[in-house]
Image (cartoon, rainbow, N blue to C red):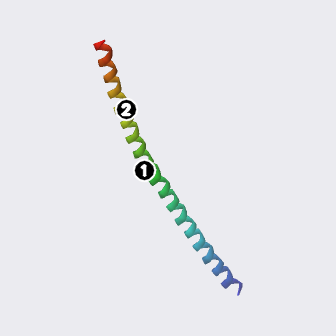
Amino acid sequence: MYDLMSLELAKQRREELLREAELSHQARALRVTRGRRAGRWLSALVWEITRHAGRLLKILRTLRNAG
């Protein structure tokens, strides 16, 4: 009787551990995906700001040389 209960408990514990590992794996994958998406968005934003700053500096140089 006790052997049967311990086998059931061991099986139940194993299933719980597998579920926990799967949830952990999914959470890690989600964090990585978010990080990539944010990184891509951030790099595009930095590129746009740098581009506009360069255009502004070019206009200011032109105005300074003309005056």
For residue 20, side relative to residue 41 (left or right): right
Q: Quadrant of residue 48?
A: top left
- Label disc, if present, on residue 37 of the rendered structure: 1
Query: Mark number for residue 9?
Result: none
Task: Determine whether 28 is above or below 45 in the image.
Answer: below
Which image quadrant for residue 10?
bottom right
Indicate whether 25 appears above or below 52. below
Q: How far across and down, in percent of the image, does residue 50 sit?
A: 37, 32
- Residue at left offset 46%, top offset 52%: 34
- Structural distance between the alpha carbons of marks 2 and 1: 20 Å
Q: Are marks 2 and 1 in contact (CB under 8 Å)?
A: no
Residue drawn at x 62%, y 76% is 12
Residue placed at 31% from the left, 23% from the top?
A: 59
In the structure shown, which secondary structural element does the residue marked by tag 2 occupy?
A: helix
Instruction: Assign the N terminus to one quadrant of the image.
Output: bottom right
- Give the residue at mark 2: 50
Q: Nearer the viewer, residue 8 or 57?
A: 57
- Mark 1: which amino acid? Arg
Name the residue nearer the viewer: 67 or 32.
67
> How far across and down, in percent of the image, does residue 3 sit?
68, 83
